[in-house]
Amino acid sequence: MLDLMERTERRRSGRPTVVQNARTAAELMDAIHNLQRQQAALTTQLEASFASNGTVSRQFAHLSLSRAQIGSVAIAARSIGRNMLGEASSAAKRISEAVAQLDLEQTRVKATLSVVEQVVELKACVLGVVGSMGAPQDWETAAEYISRASKIPQEVINSGFAAEVVPTAEVPDAPGITLHNAAQSLSQLFSREFETAVDHGDGASITRFFKMFPLIGRSKEGLDAYGKYVCQGVASRARASMQAASVAASHDSLAYPKALTRLFEHIAQVVDSHTPLVERHYGVGTMAKVVQRLHGEADVQGGIILDTWYDERSIGRKLTDVKSYAFSFLVQSFLPSQKDSVSSGRTQSPSPRGQSKTLPQTDDGLDLRDLDQSLNEISAMLMPWSLYFRFISSRSVTLDSTDIAPPHLVHASLGANSDTNNRTNIPRLEVPPFLEDSNLPRKVSKILLEPFSAFTTFFLRRSVEKAFQLDEFPQGLSLTLSKTLTANPPYITSAVDDVMYIVNQILQRSLATSQAALVLALLATMSRVLGSDFIGMIQRKMRDECYPKAAIQGAMPPEEKIISFITLANNLDVSVDYIQRIVQSHLADGATRFDSEHGDARTPLSSLFPMNDDSENVRKALVSLEATLAGKAMDLNSDALTVLFSQVVKPRIRPILADAFRDAEYSGPDDITSDVRRSEEFAEGVNELPSVKGRVRAGWEALMDPLRRLLTDHNSQALSKVATAYFSNLLERRIWTYRGRITELGAVNLERDVVETVSVIVSGQNFKSREAFNRCLEVLTIMNMEEEEWDSWLSSETSQDHGWVLDKDERDRARTMVAGRA
């Protein structure tokens, strides 16, 4: 039954029975018939294919014929290659071997002829040297013969063939020995003659014998003799400059810096003027040897100048005095117990504004003018030293130094007419070992850099201390608008101008030294001193001397306290502006700038600090100084304005608002009648301030205008912003108090009064100050919306946010401001 069902299923599906799957005789016969049908179909297809492709058979026949022909050709080609080309190949091989043998013999002949020619040249040179050094004493010719002989290979000079051919009866020694003895003799002779020419000041003879040292292979001796010669000139000129400086030191404060500058300038001039001659005869890069000798002389002469200056100016004693100074005024100023004595000490010695910035002698015997002069001298010596240091580094270029700038790219003059702009893109320089290990850099560090750092730090702190000792508040300031202010804005104390003048001078003098490490240390010190002493002193005065606190609760603080506090707040704001201008003037790069304020040219940082990453490090330090000091001053200034607002402004804003709305009525039935009556009274002059706007203007201007005209623009805007924010909060509270008891007409009047009040408050301020009243204005806008408009807003709120400041509950509450609305 199952088999029958399977067969039936296969017949329905149309699938033929497979022999392997046949289970009965009928299935087997069915599978066999199926195979026979497939065989017949395939046979029919093959016969049709062969019948239609007779061309294929013909092509196979042609291929068979071509194969037979190609076989005969291949047999003929093999016969030709074996019988004909084999003989030609053998002949070519024999010819090639013969040509190679001939070339070898020719090369050997040429080498022999070359050796013979060199030996002949050697013999001529030996005889020429001996002959020239004899009776004629023609030293140039003898040196030329030795120079010609030096071009002959040593293996030829020391060969047995040369030893047999070159010696003669007059010159029996081997050619190598003869040439060596002649060069040695000429070297000694040239040295003696060079020294004699130096003693007699014979420039022509000096040049003559100097040029002949390289010809005899004695470049080292020639450079040593030349280096000794130029060092003698440098030493003699340095001694003369030192003697002149010693005589002029009593009346010329820059005598020693001038002597040191002349020393470095002389060395630079020698190197610049003599480099072409030396490198033309001795080779490129050989001037580095002479530069090293010259620096050795500069090491000695410069050390003498520095030691003499250090002793003559009593720098050691000044360092001791500076380090032992106690800064009593600054220390006592920060002690609460010393408040009264400090205050009285300041008022006993006022200094009129407009006097010279030069400060008098201190109480401890330290003369700031003398100290400032010492700093000028140190700076005047550090500037040429920095240029000299870079100059020697650039000119100490050897043939192996491929990563150092060539000498012609580096600024060569240390004089006043130097073109600093050409040094803006100087490649990176490396300090040569002889310069780094010499004694002069150590002396500069000990005698110049350390005192400069100590003196500058003391000078800055003492200047801050003295500025506050002589500090004077501007005169003629008043909070009464009817009184004319006699002082000129900005209204600051004299300490700000004094201190910032000193800061600019110190910063300019420090940068001019071109000592990156020194500048970085001084900038950190300046940030610390100004942050702790200068800003700290202002903070102490605000807290202890000028804090605007009323003697009686609710009363106005004393006017002089308010004015003094405002002046100190102005000090902070103006100090930030000063610091930013000073730093930015030194950060500006590019071409040399001219400072019109101080009448001097300022060089870009990239030219002052061309080595390594010094200019970038100094730039970052200047930016950090500006950011640190500006941050501290602005934080304290913000706190000061907060105090001014809370003690002076805030207690009087609420009365102004209450007085402005004291007669305003927005809920009565006779709003129209009262408005008409107020308008008639105002027209007849019965009421001078009938409106809310008029009262707000009178009260606000009486409160803020006296403060604004004394504050700087920045402080005025900041104080107005805080006061505006507080006023808007009070105004919003008052508006909410009318909820549920205001009529529709009263809502219109209220909106008018509030809008006019806002226009008065934000008058003269930044436009963004109106944002403080957004909440108040939104309450009024929603309160006065028509029902259709409000319904439209409500329907769109679910799909779009309209940027409300008020949240949904507050908007619903504002809609119920008018009485009778649900």
Image (cartoon, rainbow, N blue to C red):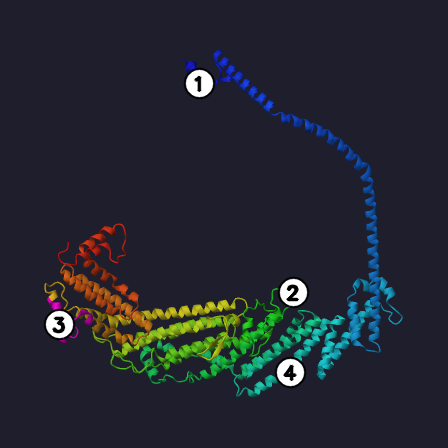
Check contact, mark 2 vs mark 1: CB within 8 A.
Answer: no
- Is residue 433 rendered to the left or right of residue 205? left
Magenta stretch secondary structure, dominant: helix
Query: Mark 2 or 1, which is nearer the eye?
Result: 1
Residue 545 can be seen, yes or no:
no
Give the alpha-carbon distance from disc 3 to disc 4, as whole Å. Answer: 103 Å
Are there few (<14), some (14-19), or many (20+) residues within 10 Å of tag 4? few
Q: Amino acid under label 4? A: Ser
Q: CA distance from mark 1 to mark 3?
A: 116 Å
- Secondary structure, mark 2, is loop
Q: Secondary structure at mark 4?
A: helix
Mark 1 residue type = Arg
Residue 390 position, x and y percent, is 57, 72
Instruction: Give the labeled residue for mark 2.
Output: 400
**Kind of residue indicated by mark 2:** Asp
- Look at mark 4 in the image and give the residue it sits on: 236
Image quarter of the N terminus: top left
Q: Residue at left 35%, top 77%?
A: 333
| C-alpha separation, residue under disc 2 versus residue under disc 1 | 97 Å
Which of pointers 1 and 3 indicates the residue nearer the eye? 3
Marks 3, 4: nearer the viewer: 3
Residue 515 place in picture, x, y as percent: 52, 72
Percent x, y for residue 553?
Answer: 20, 73
Left or right: where 804 falls relative to 105: left
Which residue is disc 3 drawn over? 680
Do the CB atoms of the residues marked 2 and 3 lie less than 8 Å apart? no
Between 616 and 724, which is closer to the camera in this rendering? 724
Q: Which residues are magenta?
A: 673-695
Q: Which residue is mark 1?
A: 10
Real-space Cα separation, disc 2 to disc 3, in angstroms: 102 Å
Element class at badge 1: helix
